[in-house]
Image (cartoon, rainbow, N blue to C red):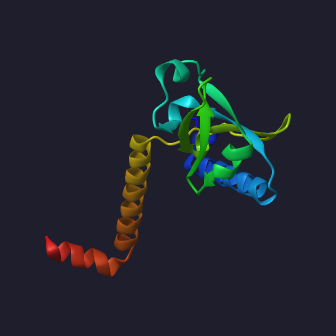
């Protein structure tokens, strides 16, 4: 069975940390930047009018400068900022998981290229469940490796 190395929990964690540290570094240097993000993972608050949202492709480029840069908020999992859209400059807070960022640019130079996908809630639950099952199996194996514990379990039956 072939493993998609770019979608393993370890690689996702590595990329998320890299994206977080890169954005943090840019903020520390007061450096404006742009990022390309998958639209399907973006939340707009308030929701954008249909004609504006409908004009986006699968990936959208956001240029963080001026007020948009100043309003940006970064945490370990998510990124958000305020921006104006369309000719009427419709204001909305844009937020998305860090792993939905596909590229980060300063000027014409790409700093980060991310091939990992964000984990959807159902996928995250599956990963946690698999991790718990593996942990339980490892605990049971360790328990049964001790002959004294085997005796106790036999007496229980």
Query: Quick check: 45 left or right of 94?
Result: left
Q: Going by the picture, which residue comes out furthest to the bottom?
A: 148
State left or right for residue 136 relative to residue 154: right
Residue in the image at 49% along x and 29% along y = 48
Can you tell which quarter of the image residue 117 is in?
top right
Q: Is residue 88 above or below residue 64?
A: above
Which residue is rendered at x = 58% and y = 57% of the image? 76
Q: Residue furthest right?
A: 108
State the image coordinates of residue 129 (x, y, percent, origin top left).
37, 52
Pick the residue in front: 147 or 111.
Answer: 111
| Image quarter in which the N terminus is found | top right
108 or 139: nearer the viewer? 108
Label total for image = 0
Task: Identify the image quadrant of the C terminus.
Answer: bottom left
Residue found farthest to the front = 88
Residue at image position (77%, 43%) is 33
Residue 5 position within the rendered picture, expressed as x and y whole percent measured from the top left: 63, 41
Q: Residue drawn at (35%, 66%), measured in percent from left and top?
A: 140
| Residue 17 appears left or right of 156 | right
Picture coordinates of residue 153, whole percent (x, y): 22, 73
102 versus 15 height, above or below: above
Q: Position of residue 11 (x, y in %)?
A: 63, 48
């Amino acid at each position: 069975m072939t493993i998609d190395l770019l979608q393993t929990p370890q690689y996702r964690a590595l990329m998320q940390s890299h994206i977080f540290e890169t954005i943090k570094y840019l903020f520390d240097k007061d450096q404006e930047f742009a990022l390309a993000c998958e639209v399907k993972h973006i939340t707009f608050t308030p929701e954008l009018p249909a004609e504006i949202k409908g004009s986006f492709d699968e990936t959208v480029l956001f240029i963080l400068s001026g007020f948009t840069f100043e309003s940006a908020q970064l945490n370990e999992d998510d990124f958000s900022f305020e921006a104006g859209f369309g000719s009427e400059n419709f204001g909305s807070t844009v937020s998305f998981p860090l792993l939905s960022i596909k590229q980060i640019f300063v000027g014409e130079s790409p700093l980060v290229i991310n091939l990992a996908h964000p984990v959807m809630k159902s996928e995250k639950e599956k990963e946690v469940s698999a991790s718990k099952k593996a942990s339980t199996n490892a605990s049971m194996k360790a328990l049964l490796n001790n002959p004294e514990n085997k005796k106790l379990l036999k007496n229980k039956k």
